[in-house]
Image (cartoon, rainbow, N blue to C red):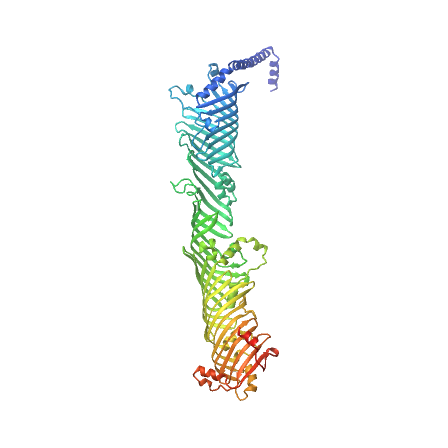
Amino acid sequence: MHQIIEKGKALVKTNRFRKILKRIGFFIIGFLGIILIFFIGLRIYFNQNKATIMTEINQKINDNISGHASIGDVGYKFLIGFPNFTVVLNKVELRDSLYAIHKRSVLKAAEIEVRLNVLSLLHKKVDIEKVVLIDTKIDLFKDQNGVSNSNIFKPKPKTNEPKSKTETEIGEVDFKDVVFISQNLQRNKLFHFEVNSLRCKINYNDDGWDTDLYLDVFAKSMAFNTKKGSFIKDKRVKGKLAVQFSKTKNKIDVLTEKLGIGDDDFDIKASFGLDKDHPMMDINIKTHILWLNAAHLLDPHIFKILNHFNITKPLDAQCSIKGDMNAVGDPEIIVDAQIKDNVLVSSEGETKDCSFEGRYTNNFKNGLGYNDINSAVIVKNFTGNYKGIPIEIPAAAINNLEKPVATGNLHSKFDVEKLGNIFGDDFIKFNGGTANVDFKFNVDIVALRISKPRFTGKVNIEKANMLLRSKNLSFQTNILLDFTDEALFIRNIKYQRDKNIVFLDGKIDNFLNLYYDDPEKMVAVLNINSPFMDVKKFMGVLTHSENKKESQKEVKKVDTKKRIALVEKCQVVINLNLEKMVYSNLTARNAKINILANNRRFYIKQGMIETCGGKITFASQLIPQGNLFDVKTNVNIATVDIPQFLTSFKNFGIKSFQPQNIKGNLSAKADLSIKMTQSGDLVDDSAKGNLQYDIKNGSLTDFKPIMKVGKYAFPNRDVRHIVFNDLSGRLNMSGSLVNIDYFKVSSNVLNFDVEGIYSFKKGTKLGLTIPLRNPKDDAGIKDKAKRDALRYKGIVLHLLVVDGKDGEMKIKMGSLSDKNKSTASK
């Protein structure tokens, strides 16, 4: 190696090497000189022939267009495009022949570089090798009347000459800061792109040409229908496209991979027909993208729909756009997406572990046009988990995006306790049991919310444990909800707590429509059959009260409260059929009661019970007032046993005698209002109204008010046991006061009348009218008029009954004043 280096040093020092090096230097200097002389010559040629070149360029352009081309100036760039010649055209403008109508130039360029073939120039011909457009606007326009500025190029003359002699081939194109606009007012289309750079070198062949196009564009508008907005609006498009033009097919094909649009990459295969009347396009796009990123690339009309939902992880999507670029309205658009193990977010919450195949198409049925009415979103093989509840939708579709209707099938099987995630646990808590859901649905969608749903199918809940929070009431039940086109049928519900057993079934006509549109008109008819019911406890279940102090958890569950509010607005008709019932101390059988419940108001239209050996019929209404109910009732009592009846109602608070002091069969009519607690207890001193009664086959035993009088007035009569054939009266109640209009007793021992005021507290002032004659034989007088005429013959005793000590009554001589009589008669 050392020897080679030494030989090299020796060669450099020889005269022969120096001569070779000198000749190489002269050659390079000479070559550069020739080039310099060549370009100086070209410059001299250009300056001497500038006018001719401008004329040639203008002539070549004008020969090929129907309109006018103007060039402000022509310049020359030294050494650019060697060995060819680069001409700079400044202030270039192309106008078609109809410019005076539409006032829009086809092209306006601040600068166009044109690289010309030198050999062609020497023959005084112009062949263009490359065109560079700088700061240029290309504007293709058609107005509403069909007047266009793009029909600028003249048709090619037919000739048999070779192509090179009849056509100008541009070998390379370069755009810098170019604005491209294509606007069709007649078809409502607008394509507007700001081209930062576009470079391509064109390779020609017998059937056309092909090129690799390097693109960096900002899309201002790509609107197939300006009324709906633009695709990829305000997005940057950057990448390489393989472009091919075929004369035979008269179309341009485009193929690209990983074309950047916005923040995502797309694989695109497209073709664009060049037919003048019906230029057809076919664009196929594939990508892996986030849902909202994809939605932002679509026009605002579609984005408005998609933006109500989100899918949190990227998904695979394909889009096909086909149609006539000159046609009115949208092209055919089909978007397919594959979602796997994702999260679907909507206004109703999150659906996790979500997988499905989705398709959007604006050509649901061929021949009906590409429009919203014929658009659809199709979902297949949907699976997901909504708030712990698994959902399966084998097939579903949303048709007609102007008036969307969703149809499909839904299946689910889950633990009932998961319902708490949807309805909340603040009203009812579910625990245990399973639910099976099998639905077909047909649902109108307004503003992307469910409206006028039509479900058919069943919800079957078995062995569900339910806790009514407001009453801390728990029970186990089965529930079958059967949705048909006409009604919701409720079946198989059983409630049992302690001795209370309730079997419930019913239906709600037109449930699914009224639930959303007009819940006040919804009527639920419930049939309740029970072998035993404690009415007060059952009322406690029906008349639950909400906790006004809302926890933070409750405040967040707005949707839950809305659902409960909707249910509470509906009317409920309850048909009670009870074999045995109790109310406080009242025991009854064969109770048949018809109740209308609406917003915690209860109206008993018809009620009938058998109790105390007789029947009671009634009609009532319970109106909530705070924590109480205002009760208004009309009652008819037919031949009930008095001791049992009084005992059942705690003797109505009367202390002066006990139920065992009076016997007989009571018939009465009452028109009363009273206050009642939510648990069914009567509020003391709250009763108001009128009572008219009649007792048959009655007797008074150890009746203290009479015994006190009889001790002195009738010492020879047995006043401890009085049998009467007529005991009737009429009274008016107002709180603790009872205004006795009349109280008439006709017996075998004595007759007496009572009127005045009786008080459960203080204020008693009753007037007793007692004829002293012995009525022992009056019962044998059949003529009532004669019997009444004998009633007051002889001496008549007038006494006053007033308050005594410890709730006892005190009797003294005297009679009621006219004022007290007037008060008592009211």
Does residue 167 lie above or below 299 as drawn?
Answer: above
Foreground residue among 703 and 110: 703
Foreground residue among 21 and 174: 174
* 369 with respect to 222 (left or right): left
**Which image quarter: residue 34?**
top right
The extreme front residue here reads 818
Please say whether residue 534 is visible from this viewpoint: no
The extreme bottom residue here reads 716
Foreground residue among 219 and 290: 219
Viewport quadrant of the N terminus? top right
- The total number of labels drawn is 0
Does residue 823 lie above or below 349 as drawn?
Answer: below
Q: How far from the left and from the top, in percent, is residue 706?
A: 54, 82
Does residue 280 lie above or below 64 as drawn?
Answer: below
Q: How far from the left and from the top, in percent, is residue 327?
A: 41, 35
Q: Residue at x 59, y 74 (%)?
A: 761
Q: How far from the left and from the top, in percent, is residue 474?
A: 52, 63
Please say whether residue 49 is visible from this viewpoint: yes
* 248 with respect to 129 (left or right): left
Q: How far from the left and from the top, in percent, is residue 72?
A: 52, 21
